[in-house]
Image (tube, rainbow, N blue to C red):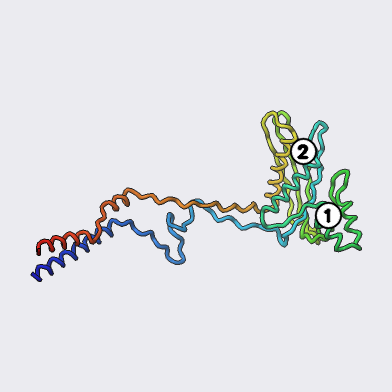
Amino acid sequence: MKRYFLVAGIAVLGLCQMVGLANAQDAPPAPPVAQPGTAPAPGTPGAPRPGANTPAPPAPLPGVLTVMVFPFENAAKIPQESTVDFRNLAASVAEAVRNGLERSRVYSTAMFSPDSVLIERARQESPANAGVAQAVAQVINPTTGAVDPNLAMQLARLTGMQALMLGSIEEYRYDANAHKVEIVGSAQLLNATTGDPIRNAAVSGSFTSSAGASEITIAQGAANDLAQRLLAGLAVPTPPPSAPVKKQPKHRISQAEEGSHHTRIPGWLPAGVILGILFATVK
């Protein structure tokens, strides 16, 4: 009788081992593990997506982190029939360029204004220096809107800015039949201490609208395009992309996995059946 139970027990253990091997063969293979110093294989967690490139680092201006931007001058010939306020148009180009500098997250900028906090601080820190008030009053010609480079450099330096930006609208063309405006403009960055030019750009921007749009609307679109082209010409880094929120994909069971779940047999089931038969036979 003991020999009978010994043979039966060995048979039970062998059957359990065979069931375990069968289940192991049905299980999906484990993902490959990257070796140290190697990039993960495509399709594995942490592997770069196809076509995804690492963004290039910003190209900051040499030795410059702060820039004072002055309103652009209008040097273009104004058509008599035009309805555009060219002083405001030039100022909007300057503000768009300043915003591009600020959004690059490389530079800190300030638009010149007689009432700005920087100018007021310069007045308070140098009350005996009458040059601050005089420079503020004379830096922009009230008739032509032209900016005096020497006074602009003085104000940028007194307010602690490392550089200043000057610009102008050189040409303006409006084609009423084509509903198109083209603007040629230039901008230059100067060292606030030495006055040496750092970077220069001269480009043209244009905008075409559908029928019925006013000249002012089309001109503003061309001014925005001009500002973006000036930023590219000055090699100002584009704003860094915001990181998108990634949603974890739901795990879907493949047909192979689903079939393996249905055919997988727990290892204890055959052993329990055989032991039950043995106990019934002994009784």
Left or right placement of residue 203 versus residue 9 in this view? right
Residue at horizontal 46 percent and vertical 52 percent from the top: 248
Compare residues 182 and 273 and report the one nearer the observer.
Answer: 273
Mark 1 = which residue? 152
Disc 1, SS: helix
Name the image quarter holding residue 24.
Answer: bottom left
Relative side of 250 to 10, left or right: right
Give the image location of residue 38, x and y in percent.
45, 63
Q: What residue type is labelled 2?
A: Tyr
**Residue farthest to the left, as pictured:** 1
Q: Which residue is drawn at 79% across and 51% down?
A: 70
Rounded to the nearest angstrom, the CA distance separating label 1 from label 2 is 26 Å
In the foreground, 69 or 232: 69
- Residue 27: numbered disc: none
- Residue 35 x/y as whole percent: 42, 65
The residue that mark 2 highlights is 172
Q: How crowded is mark 2: few (under 14 residues within 10 Å), some or many (20 or more)?
A: many
The amino acid sitting under disc 1 is: Ala
- Which quadrant of the figure has residue 185? top right
Q: Is residue 278 above or below residue 220?
A: below
Where is the C terminus found, in terms of image quarters?
Answer: bottom left
How far from the left and from the top, in percent, is residue 93? 74, 45
Identify the residue at horizontal 64%, vertical 57% (top origin). Answer: 58
Q: How many labels does the image show?
A: 2
Q: Is tag 1's residue or tag 2's residue first in the polypeptide sequence?
A: 1
